[in-house]
Image (cartoon, rainbow, N blue to C red):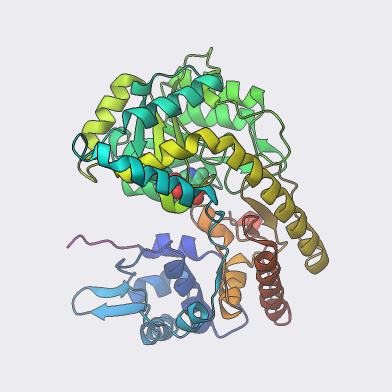
């Protein structure tokens, strides 16, 4: 078995400011539990030896032993003879099972319910399926009519595309993982935004990339000078970026920043992987989305990722990669290590849906606008001190909560029936304890219920605040 372990140093950095008002062992075990629950410490990871962690954290060994014991008793750690303590997810941990039973709200996912058109499109697709049963089976590149429809959509949006520049994938995440595996070797540098979409940094980290962060904020977006410097100083092999309605900040690049990115990438020979999964989800912008790659006087090498996951339905699992033909061929060859193709039926459903995609997007826009309004209202009423940015599209608000309490709030929310991703899930090394991502994708009643749960969780923390709240800016 592969030995996956986390060093005391890496765990300390993920722990961030973990101390609360409880006894040290309890606060420590609570924070490790959250890291396991939200995937920052993947299950089956071997934790550092108690002595090493105690030394690194400046604690007595007894404190760490007590924290590990508590984790073990609750099913989050298993001690294996000769292999130390390994992270586990308990089948029926006391704080997980009841919450599920009572229908916990999962704000850790920012995705909308399925479009009502999916069922109708599936019936039409099933009727067409018999014609495909003899001609198609394993399909690593995508059905010709789906690739054609996607290419036409790009061409109409200002980026002339031919069907053989498209590869259909199992959602955008599959595309990100495949590109990471194919384009990045262990030790290569990969640039990405901070904060960023967590499963993208997981994918890049999994292939051994050294991550180069560039800052994005909700109000100021990207800093052109920082972006240029990051490219020039590190010569990254690949840069993974979300120029439109960036997840989680909701920021979009200005035309000047887009040009800066392309210029820098062209100079350093970096492959730009542009994730446009959320790019169509505009609330205020009237003009249809213009693909990032549509303007490229700078001559950067650009690969675009798209998906129907956020516009139509996450359960459809249809995404795609747009790239030059040689890259598509390379990706098709590399794909078979992980999977042997995209299901034909789901592709036929997508073929049915694409002509109505703009209609679906229009509906999404009004749903997102209504929920954004309600979330803004509820946050202003319940958390007048939180900094709530005005986003013009996307799926969530990246809210400043004014104190480095995001992980504690996420834990307290679980007891209130709300699963929410703590700010640090969107960063690396424990940053963003002062932020929380709040989705604007739920129905109004669910949103109200979720924010009420947050209010109760926050009240339980504030009633009992941590004695000294260090300024996280000095830690990040
Ligand atoms: C920016 C971004 N890219 C990719 C994905 C994954 O999309 P898919 O469901 O198509 O795999 C998500 C989903 O949250 C996302 O937010």
- Is the magenta region chiefly helix, strand or loop? loop
When asked about the image quadrant of residue 436, the answer is bottom right
Where 292 sits versus 392, above or below? Answer: above
- Residue 431 position, x and y percent, is 56, 55
Taking 231 as reference, is 367 left or right?
right
Is residue 217 among what the camera can see? no
The residue positioned 28% from the left and 35% from the top of the image is 182
Which residue is more in the foreground, 273 or 109?
Answer: 109
Which residue is more in the foreground, 189 or 240?
Answer: 240
Taking 221 as reference, is 133 left or right?
left
When asked about the image quadrant of residue 132, the answer is top left
Taking 211 as reference, is 399 left or right?
right
- Residue 48 position, x and y percent, is 34, 69
Where 282 sits versus 236, above or below? Answer: below
Residue 166 belongs to the span the image colors magenta:
no
Which residue is more in the foreground, 153 or 324?
Answer: 153
- Which quadrant is home to the N terminus? bottom left
Where 115 sits versus 405, above or below? Answer: above
When asked about the image quadrant of residue 318, the answer is top left
- Residue 441 position, x and y percent, is 62, 55
Is residue 401 among what the camera can see? yes
Q: What is the tally of numbered marks visible in this picture?
A: 0
The residue positioned 61% from the left and 79% from the top of the image is 416
Q: Which residue reaches farthest front?
A: 127
Residue range in magenta is 1-6
The residue positioned 34% from the left and 74% from the top of the image is 88
């Amino acid at each position: 078995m592969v030995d996956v372990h986390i060093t005391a140093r890496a765990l300390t950095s993920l722990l961030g400011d973990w101390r609360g008002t409880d006894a040290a062992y309890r606060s420590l075990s609570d924070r490790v539990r959250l890291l396991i629950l939200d995937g920052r410490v993947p299950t089956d990871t071997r934790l550092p030896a108690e002595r090493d962690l105690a030394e690194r954290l400046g604690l007595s060994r007894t404190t760490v032993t007590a924290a590990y014991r508590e984790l073990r008793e609750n099913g989050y750690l298993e001690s294996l003879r000769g292999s130390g303590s390994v992270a586990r997810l308990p089948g029926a941990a006391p704080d997980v099972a009841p919450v599920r039973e009572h229908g916990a709200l999962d704000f850790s996912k920012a995705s909308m319910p399925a479009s009502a058109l999916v069922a109708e499109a599936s019936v039409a697709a099933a009727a067409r399926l018999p014609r495909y049963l003899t001609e198609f089976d394993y399909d690593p590149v995508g059905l010709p009519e789906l690739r054609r429809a996607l290419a036409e959509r790009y061409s109409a949006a200002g980026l002339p595309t031919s069907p053989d520049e498209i590869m259909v994938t199992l959602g955008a995440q599959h595309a990100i993982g495949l590109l990471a595996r194919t384009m990045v070797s262990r030790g290569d540098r990969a640039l990405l935004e901070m904060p960023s979409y967590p499963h993208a940094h997981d994918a890049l980290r999994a292939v051994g990339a050294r991550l180069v962060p560039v800052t994005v904020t909700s109000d100021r977006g990207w800093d052109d000078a920082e972006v240029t410097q990051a490219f020039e100083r590190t010569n990254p092999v690949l840069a993974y970026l979300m120029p439109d309605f960036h997840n989680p900040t909701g920021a979009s690049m200005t035309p000047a920043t887009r040009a800066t990115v392309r210029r820098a990438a062209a100079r350093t020979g970096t492959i730009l992987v542009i994730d446009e999964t959320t790019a169509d989800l505009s609330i205020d912008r009237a003009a249809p989305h213009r693909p990032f790659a549509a303007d490229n006087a700078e001559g950067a090498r650009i690969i675009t990722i798209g998906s129907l996951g956020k516009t139509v339905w996450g359960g459809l699992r249809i995404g795609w990669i747009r790239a030059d033909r040689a890259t598509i061929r390379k990706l098709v060859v590399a794909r078979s290590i992980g999977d042997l193709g995209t299901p034909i039926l789901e592709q036929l459903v997508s073929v049915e849906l694409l002509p109505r995609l703009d209609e679906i997007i229009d509906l999404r826009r009004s749903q997102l606008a209504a929920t954004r309004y309600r979330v803004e209202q509820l946050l202003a009423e319940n958390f007048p001190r939180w900094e709530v940015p005005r986003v013009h599209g996307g799926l969530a608000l990246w809210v400043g909560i004014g104190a480095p309490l995001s992980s504690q709030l996420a834990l307290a929310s679980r007891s209130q029936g709300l699963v929410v991703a703590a700010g640090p899930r969107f960063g690396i090394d424990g940053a963003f304890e002062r932020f929380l991502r709040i989705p604007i994708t739920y129905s109004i009643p669910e949103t109200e219920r979720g924010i009420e749960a947050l209010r109760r969780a926050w009240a339980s923390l504030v009633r009992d605040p941590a004695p000294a709240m260090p300024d996280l800016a000095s830690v990040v």
